[in-house]
Structures are given as structure tokens and as C-alpha cells.
Image (tube, rainbow, N blue to C red):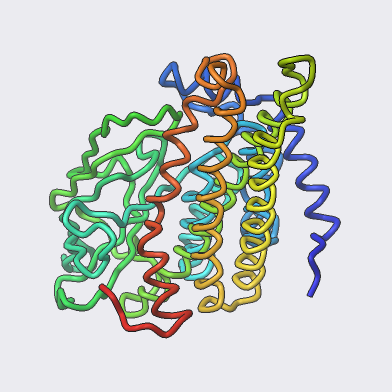
């Protein structure tokens, strides 16, 4: 067991941190407040090979694993630039297509996902299903050699930036009591496909959408992998989603903690830095402990996943996502408290994070469902839902 990251990843972190510093939190928030995107950062990260580090080399990727992609997202988030679409485009969609896609699907999508010129988002959540994926009603029925998709999705990130959506549906003959998912690549310009923006109180460059599929015709080659083996394909994408979600939170935790520590060292009241008082020092030290523990679990989950242990990675990925989300919430809250009134001033870049980090308790899976998983699968307790 080795708790030291490989030299290649250490160097990757340094390089990505420099890129993140070039843009920084001010750029990110300026774009978000203006309703603009972070395309400059996205495309530069793609040109430098950072977006595709986990994808196969023969399709333009770096040939590494999810651990390296997670490190990229963490470093960008720690610099104040958390790129949410990294969670879905290279991590979920890129992974699923890499592992289960046809040769044509790989050639069509992976090079663009790797260099940032194409983006694919992921759609599983439905208005009447929520955390219960077994109630998915988006249906795919055969139409000659092709498919017709009908249904709805909700809270799907970044559809306005995407070339395609990886849709999770069910085949027409699938019984509703047991999840039998089928995964399809749906171009965002397909006739019958519409999406509407959901107004959110989160200030971020990425928007959330409701999707409407009204008899969308897709060719046979839109199906990803095997129709009858899609449950394994689905979870091959959900573990990276949780690992990346944890890394997203870890980076924000570092960003908020760095700001709090910097302020606590330079702000003086009664002639001494406020960080000299235990009332502020101890909460910040606690966050550092939470950060390091969550980071270790995230690295464990990524290592297990990259080694091919999907089941073992599932337990660790859920725990990592839970721990990192809690650390981020504590970090931002304490950073605001450390700054006092300045914590809610725009120039300090912390106030908007209060709502942003709260999302980590809800998505990509709620903390309650994580605890259900741990109770049932890790502790052997009776199923509670």
C-alpha cells in the first residue's frame, strides 16, 4: 500500500494548477455572473491533454485512469475553476464509450471528448424517479433497425454546451419493477428533442435543464453496448461520477481553506492575526483533517476502479463523495465566518460557494442514499428503502 502519488501525477497536478492559476476564481465568477461559459479554459485544458487523460491513447487520450482525471478536476477547482462538465463528458460518457462502445462510436466521440472539441452530457434523472432509477420511464422501442425514444429527464447539466446526450432509458419490453437500462447517444439537434433551462439559485457557468423526448428517431448505432448488459455499463459510469464529484468537492474545500487561512494570517484585531485565536484556528484545522481523510478515500476509490474492481470501487466512491461533500460545506461555511462580513462581499469570492457546495449533498447521489448503501452493503443491515 502506497500513500504517495506517482511522480507523473504529481507533475500533472503542478501543470494543471498553473493552468488554473492563469484563469482563477475571478475569471470563473465573472463568466458565471455574466451567464457566459468557461470555454477558453475548457479548450486550453483540452489542447494540453488534460481533459482526456483517462481515455485510451489510440483515440487521442492520455491512456491513464480516472485517478489522473480526478486530479485534474481537483486542481482546477482548487484554483477556483471547478469545471462541472469534466464529471460528465470525459468521466462518465468517455468511460462508458471507451469500455462498451463500438469502434465507430469510439472513433466518432472519444478524440473530440479528449481534446475538448466535443462535449457529451449524461441524462438519467427523471421527474418521477429521482433516486429510484428502477422507476425510469424513458422508453426506447424498436423501429425497424433503429429506435424511437420518448420520455423526460430533469436536472441535466450543460445540455446547451453539448453535442450529444448519453440517455439512460429502458427498452419497451422491460418490466417496470426491475431496472433494465439501455444507453443511447442522442445528438442535441435530433428532431423531437427539446430542452428548457431550469432557473437555479446557484451561480455557475453550467446550466441545468429539463429534457423532452417526443418520439425521437435514432439509428441502430445509437445504442451503446449490449441491450441486455446495460446495467453493468451504467454502473461503470456511475462510479467515475462519484469519484469526480468527490474531487470537485475536494478542490473547492482547498480553495475555501486557502482563502480562510490567508485571511486569518493577515487580518489583525487587537494587534495580532485573528488566526492566533483557537476559536478560528481549531475549526480550520478540523477542516484540514476532513480534507485529507476525504482525499485518501477518493484516491482509494480511484485506485480500485482503475484496477478493475467495480464493486469495491462502488463502496469507496460513495464514501468519498459523502466525505468530500461534507468537508466542502464545512470549509466554505468556516471560510465565510473567518472573513466576517467580508465573507459575503463579492470581491472575496466566497458567498456564492455557500449554495454551490450544498449541491454536493444532493448530487450525483444524495447523502441519504449513500448512507443507505453503506448500511446495507458495508454493514449488512436490512434494506431500508
Q: How many marks?
A: 0
Picture residue at 82% right of the left edge, 60% below the top: 6
Task: Determine whether 304 is above or below 26 in the image.
Answer: below
Of 350 and 142, the residue lying toward us: 350
Along the line of sight, which residue is nearer the eye, 327 or 217? 327
Residue 359 drawn above or below residue 277: below
Q: Position of residue 170 (x, y in %)?
A: 23, 68
User: In the image, residue 259 lies at what x, y percent?
Assistant: 67, 28
Quarter of the figure with the C terminus: bottom left
Left or right: where 261 falls relative to 130? right
The residue that appears at 41% across and 40% down in the rendered structure is 162
**Depth order, front residue of 170/73:** 73
Foreground of the two, 374 or 193: 374
Query: Where 158 falls versus 236 (above or below)?
Result: above
Tell me: 14 left or right of 153: right
Is residue 114 in sight in this rendering? Answer: yes
Q: Which residue occupies 76% across, 46% down?
A: 13
Q: Position of residue 207 (x, y in %)?
A: 37, 33
Query: Would residue 90 be seen by someone viewing this image from the given angle?
Result: no
Q: Where's the N terminus, which quadrant?
A: bottom right
Residue placed furthest toward the right: 7
In percent of the image, x 49 and y 52: which residue is there?
A: 109
Place of residue 180 in the rendered image (x, y in percent of width and height, measured from the top left):
26, 75
Res 115 → quadrant:
top right
**In the current view of this chain or complex, which residue is farthest to the front?**
270
Amino acid at each position: 500500500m502506497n500513500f504517495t502519488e506517482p511522480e507523473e501525477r504529481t507533475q500533472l497536478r503542478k501543470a494543471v494548477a498553473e493552468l488554473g492559476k492563469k484563469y482563477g476564481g475571478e475569471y470563473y465568477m465573472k463568466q458565471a455572473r455574466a451567464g457566459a461559459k468557461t470555454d477558453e479554459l475548457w479548450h486550453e485544458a483540452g489542447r494540453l491533454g488534460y481533459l482526456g487523460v483517462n481515455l485510451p491513447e489510440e483515440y487521442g487520450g492520455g491512456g491513464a485512469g480516472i485517478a489522473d482525471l480526478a486530479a485534474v478536476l481537483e486542481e482546477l477547482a482548487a484554483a477556483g475553476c471547478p469545471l462541472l462538465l469534466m464529471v460528465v463528458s470525459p468521466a462518465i460518457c468517455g468511460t462508458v464509450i471507451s469500455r462498451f462502445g463500438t469502434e465507430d462510436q469510439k472513433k466518432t466521440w472519444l478524440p473530440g471528448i479528449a481534446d475538448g472539441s466535443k462535449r457529451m452530457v449524461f441524462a438519467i434523472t427523471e421527474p418521477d424517479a429521482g433516486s429510484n432509477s428502477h422507476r425510469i420511464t424513458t422508453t426506447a422501442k424498436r423501429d425497424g433497425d433503429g429506435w424511437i425514444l420518448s420520455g423526460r429527464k430533469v436536472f441535466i447539466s450543460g445540455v446547451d454546451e453539448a453535442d450529444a446526450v448519453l440517455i439512460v432509458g429502458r427498452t419497451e419490453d422491460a418490466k417496470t419493477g426491475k431496472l433494465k437500462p439501455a444507453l443511447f447517444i442522442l445528438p442535441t439537434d435530433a428532431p423531437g428533442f427539446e430542452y428548457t433551462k431550469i432557473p437555479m439559485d446557484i451561480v455557475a457557468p453550467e446550466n441545468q435543464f429539463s429534457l423532452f423526448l417526443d418520439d425521437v428517431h435514432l439509428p441502430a448505432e445509437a445504442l451503446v453496448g449490449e441491450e441486455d448488459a446495460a446495467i453493468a455499463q451504467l454502473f461503470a459510469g456511475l462510479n467515475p461520477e462519484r469519484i469526480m464529484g468527490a474531487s470537485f468537492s475536494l478542490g473547492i474545500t482547498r480553495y475555501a481553506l486557502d482563502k480562510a487561512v490567508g485571511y486569518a494570517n493577515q487580518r489583525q484585531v487587537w494587534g495580532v492575526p485573528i488566526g492566533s485565536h483557537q476559536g478560528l484556528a481549531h475549526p480550520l484545522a478540523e477542516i484540514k483533517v476532513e480534507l485529507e481523510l476525504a482525499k485518501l478515500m477518493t484516491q482509494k476509490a480511484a485506485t480500485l476502479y482503475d484496477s478493475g474492481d467495480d464493486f469495491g470501487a462502488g463502496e469507496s466512491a460513495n464514501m468519498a463523495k459523502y466525505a468530500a461533500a461534507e468537508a466542502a460545506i464545512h470549509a466554505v461555511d468556516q471560510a465565510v465566518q473567518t472573513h466576517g462580513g467580508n465573507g459575503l462581499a463579492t470581491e472575496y469570492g466566497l458567498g456564492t460557494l455557500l449554495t454551490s457546495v450544498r449541491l454536493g449533498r444532493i448530487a450525483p447521489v444524495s447523502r441519504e442514499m449513500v448512507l443507505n448503501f453503506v448500511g446495507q452493503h458495508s454493514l449488512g443491515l436490512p434494506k431500508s428503502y
